[in-house]
Amino acid sequence: MNVLQVQSLNKSFSTGFRTSVQVLNNVSFEVKEGVVTGFLGANGAGKTTTLKCIFDLIRPTSGEVLFFGNQAFDLNVRKKIGFLPERPYFYEYLTGFEFLKFYGDLIDEMTKSELVSRIMEVLEKVDLIEAKDRALRDYSKGMLQRIGIAQTILGRPKLIVLDEPMAGLDPDGRAKLSQLIREVASEGTSVFFSSHLLHDVESLCKELVILKKGQIVYTGSLDSFLSRMDSGFEVVTENDGRRAVQEIKTQAELQEVLKTIVDKRQTLIEVKRLRPNLEEAFVRISFGEEE
């Protein structure tokens, strides 16, 4: 089942009398159940506008957004979703515990004792147990990001949407959040998140959605995206105890090289497919080298 379906989404904004600019152009993609999906695009590509349309914060010019099969964004659906925007607002006079209890009181599926237990559980997950009684005004940027994540997962949602969740986190905090995302996904929760930290996206995601100038330029598996960006092969051979490395561009050339290796009775050590990492591939597709 798809937990999120975005179908032919278009959004234009008025820029003056009888003039407008189209920010989203026929955007369509799906988020699968229990899968971590990365949402990528350069600044100005339309990611934030897409997220606002998904959550009905702004109305699309046309198109449709459906959740959990074919449901509209009603109250029942909202209860199954956790969302952390890029710039969340915090009631800074509340403590970390009070902040989570404030939002937890909106969850009618838990008793008071169950809620307290769940709050302590998520505080432990985001490493904020010792700071639970400190006012949020005294939290660092990274701590605020983590308490926001805690609020997002508090109600055990079926879909979590995170906009730049790694922002403000040090390497240790990013590693812990990455582990938390893996843990949540392993329990069957779908995670859809945008990030400019492509190393984290590559390590976490199975699926990608990539926007360029308001249009989808790729949707599918991470592995397929990187495979199509292959830049050739590396062949390692050994002859008379000496190793040699060759970089080869095409499949046809590879076949010829392998035939030569056999004919000369050289030892073939390794044939490795060369492909860029996600950051290199993203630059190619986002800035014109690949379409």
Image: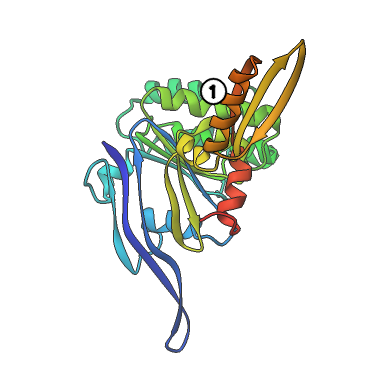
Give the vertical position of 255 relative to 43 (above or below): above
In the rendered image, residue 107, in percent from the top left (x then y), is placed at: 35, 35
Q: Quadrant of residue 190?
A: top left
Residue under the image location 49 percent in, 21 percent down: 121
In the rendered image, residue 264, in percent from the top left (x then y), is placed at: 65, 18
In the rendered image, residue 182, in percent from the top left (x then y), is placed at: 49, 25
**Amino acid under disc 1:** Lys
Q: As rendered, which of 167 and 242 lies closer to the eye?
A: 242
Is residue 95 visible in the rendered image? The answer is no
Q: Name the residue under label 1.
A: 125
Which quarter of the rendered picture does the N terminus lie within? top left
Q: In which quarter of the image is residue 195?
A: top right
Q: As rendered, which of 157 and 164 lies closer to the eye?
A: 164
Give the left or right position of residue 231, taking residue 171 as reference: left
Residue under the image location 71 percent in, 15 percent down: 238
Residue furthest to the left: 70
Q: In which quarter of the image is residue 141?
A: top right
